[in-house]
Structures are given as structure tokens and as C-alpha cells.
Image (cartoon, rainbow, N blue to C red):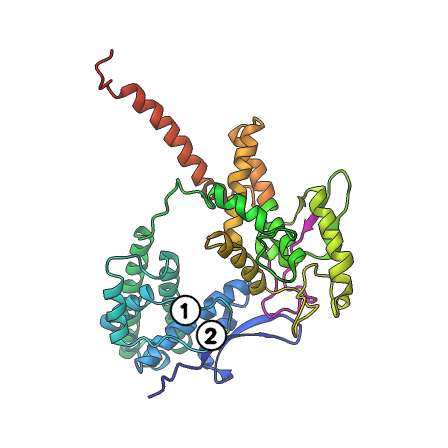
Amino acid sequence: MNNLSDNVQVKIYKDMNGLSFPAIVQDGLPCHVYLTAYLTSNHDLSFNSLKKYAYELKFLHCFFMGRAIDLVERVASGSFLSIEEIDSYIRACKFYVDTDGDNNDNKVVSLTDKRIRDAIYATSNSQPKVSAHTFNQRLNRLKSYIEFLYVCHHYDQAETEQKIRTDNQFNNFKLYISSVISKTRKNNTFTKDAFESAIPNDKFIKLLDVIQERSSNNPFKSSKLRNQLIAQILISTGVRVGAVMKLKVGDLVDDWSNPRFLLTRTPNDPTDTRRLPAANKTKALSVSISPDLMKLIKLYTATVRNITPNTHKHEFLFISEKGKTIGEPISYNAIHKVIKTFGDYVGLALHPHLLRHKWNEVFENKAKEQGFPPDKIEDLRKYAMGWVEDSKMASVYNEFQLAMTVAEISSKNQSQSVPNLRGGK
């Protein structure tokens, strides 16, 4: 028997104003009116946040639909979910990843009892298949969606015995799911080794070679200059992949003494026709680059970009160089594929954000070599990363350096306190 959720997908559409928005569809039609209404009610969120919400809603919708549980009917009738049903959902949230990387998934995992048991058995001695954050967000989405349905069906109704029973059931549901969510915040099963560099130095040196257009080790047959520039900008500036996607020709400042580009914040850019539009999460700022990198960018602009069809329609710097999308702004997935291909060649599971972490390690070392004190290094890092003044992200990116410093201090203390086992005084 075919699974009813086989054709449930998250699709990205553009409205009449050219703004992208996600929708959950089945066989090309809106999947459920309440799912659509819930997403619409969160219209003030960024596009990327809405897209995450959509995938979390798709996950829970397919799970309960696969068990013949109509959440709307359950909430409308005041029966909500039993503890056993909630627990089944919790188990599924831990072990199944919804493939949302490219928006091309045609199937949703069928969450049958047998598959859940198999997954629990297979991972009983290993880490869960999703992070604690993803697990937590899936639970939060269920809680939030049930609350939304409750407001739609029961809010502000006259108090009756039925209304009192419904409210009690609703409060019991919230209490139970909230207690589980609270526990997950304290029990992240993934432990990162703080001593592990984002990218080991030997592999990083290899990476710096293979990205070069003229390198004999470059894994690409075409688009070598473009791919080198994308990788080099990510490596040398530490910007996010969204910043590379948003970069326009007019953002380049070809100042011989201080070449740079402007990192802009233009949400809902009407000129961005991509299905997944570029987004810059950080502050607007000026990003310095080397004169050599600027020369290569100008070379790419004057040659590859200027002779490619369709580039006159937009100002975005990096473009697709072949296929149906030739001349259009490069996509998020294309950049990820470029970086992954470079990583595969040097034996790394590489993605753009890992280069941001490596940039921070290199930045820390260089700043220390130049004698900057810790507080000044943090101020410089916050500016370079585009963080707000009260951001705590510096501590996240600096775990490696902190661990090395603590280890160095601990080693000195231990050498002074451990007795000489060779009999010396």
C-alpha cells in the first residue's frame, strides 16, 4: 500500500511582490489549510526561519498522518494526544532526519513502528541521528502548532464543562511536552572535542592548493576561476555563504590601498530571483580583501561574467556558468557543492561554515602574533564577523584556542606538582 505522505514536500514559491515563501504541498497542492495558516501567522520571521518551520511541520504532519491521527480533529474535539502518542513522536524525532538540503526530496520517511524499533536498535550504542537542537525544535514545533490549533478552535469561548475539560487536556499536554523540552536542553548527547581544530593544518594546506585555478590537483573541469574565488573569499574573510551569494558587482571597492567589498543587509531583495534567496544574518560592514584577490575578482568580472548570457539582468557577482540557469545568480546548493567537492578531494567533510570556524582560528593566531590583548582581539573579531556588541558568538568560535590555553596552563601546573619519579629532588 502506498504511503499517503510519499508526495508531501516543502516547496518555495514567490508572491506577486517577488518575495520567497515556503509552503507544504502534496501532489502540487497545499497540504493542509491549518499548516498553511500556521506558517502565514509567523510572517514576521525571516525566510530561512520560516523554511525551517516548514520542514519541522512537514515532519510532524507526516508522522501523525502515517498513524491516522488527525491533529486538527483531535484538538477540535478536545482530546489532544495521549502520553503514548507523544512518546512515539519523541522517539521518531530523535532518530530520523528529514532531508531538507536541496528541496528536491520526493519522499518522506515512513515512520512505522518497525522502522522506529530498528532505528533504536541500530543506534542504541551510538549518537542519535539528529542533534539536540533539531530534536528540541521538532518538539517545540509540535507544542506551538497544537497551541495554534487550540486558539483557532477554543480560545475565548464561553466556559462550559466541556470547555473546562478541554482546557485541562490542553494544559496537561503543554505540561508534558514542556517537561521533555526542558530536559533536552540539559542533555545534549553530542560532545565536541574542543582540542580538535575545525580543519587540521595538513588538510588546510592541501585545500589552499586544490582551490587554485591552475593547480594540477583542482578537481573541477570547468568554472575553476569562479570556484576558486568563492572558496578564497570564504577562507580569507570568514563571511557566511549568504554574503557570497549576495555579493554584487557594485559592492566591490577597488581601492589600491585597501581593496574591499561591502557586505549589505537587503532583506527581500526584489532583484534576487533565486528560489532560495541570499540572506545575510550579520550587520552590514566593509570586508577587506587582498589586492591579489581583488585582481582575480576583477578578472572574473571582465571575462567570465561579462561574456556569459543573461548577466545583464542582475548585478550579482557569482553566476551559474552552464545549463538552464546560465547567467543567473549562483544558488545556495551550488556553492555548497563546490566546497564539498574541494573537501572530498582532500579527505574532509567540508561545508562553507567550517571555513568560517577555520578563519577564526587563523585570525586568533595572527592577532596574538601581533601582540593584541584578548579584549582587543574580541572587539576585532566581532567587527570582522559582523556581530552585535553583546554577541556571545566569539566564545563559540574560540573554543579551540581556549582549550589549548587551558591545556598549556594545566600542563605547567602539573609539571610543578607531580613528584620526580626518578628520585631527583
- The amino acid pointed to by label 2 is Asp
Q: Is residue 287 above or below residue 247?
A: above
In the rendered image, residue 175 lying in the magenta stretch gets the answer: no
Q: Is residue 281 visible?
A: no
Q: Is residue 370 above or below residue 387?
A: above
- The amino acid pointed to by label 1 is Asp
Displayed quadrant of residue 86: bottom left
Label of residue 98 in the image? 1
Circle 2 — which element? loop
Q: Nearer the viewer, residue 291 or 56?
A: 291
Displayed quadrant of residue 401: top left
The answer to which of marks 2 and 1 sits earlier in the sequence is 1
Q: Which residues are magenta?
A: 261-280
Q: Is residue 324 left or right of residue 190?
A: right
Circle 1 — which element? loop
In the rendered image, residue 263 lying in the magenta stretch gets the answer: yes
Q: Is residue 399 left or right of residue 187?
A: right
> Within 10 Å of the Cα at label 1, are there few (<14), some (14-19), or many (20+) other Cα atoms?
some
Give the quadrant of the N terminus: bottom left
Q: Is residue 161 visible?
A: yes
Label of residue 4 in the image? none
Give the quadrant of the C terminus: top left
Q: How many marks?
A: 2
Displayed quadrant of residue 163: bottom left
- Residue 166 drawn at (x, y percent): 29, 75
- Residue 45 drawn at (x, y percent): 53, 63
Name the residue rendered at 73%, 43% in the picture: 259
Q: Nearer the viewer, residue 332 or 39?
A: 332
- The residue tagged 2 is 105
Tag 2 and tag 1, C-beta contact below 8 Å: yes
> Within 10 Å of the Cα at label 2, are there few (<14), some (14-19), or many (20+) other Cα atoms?
some
Name the residue rendered at 68%, 66% in the picture: 321
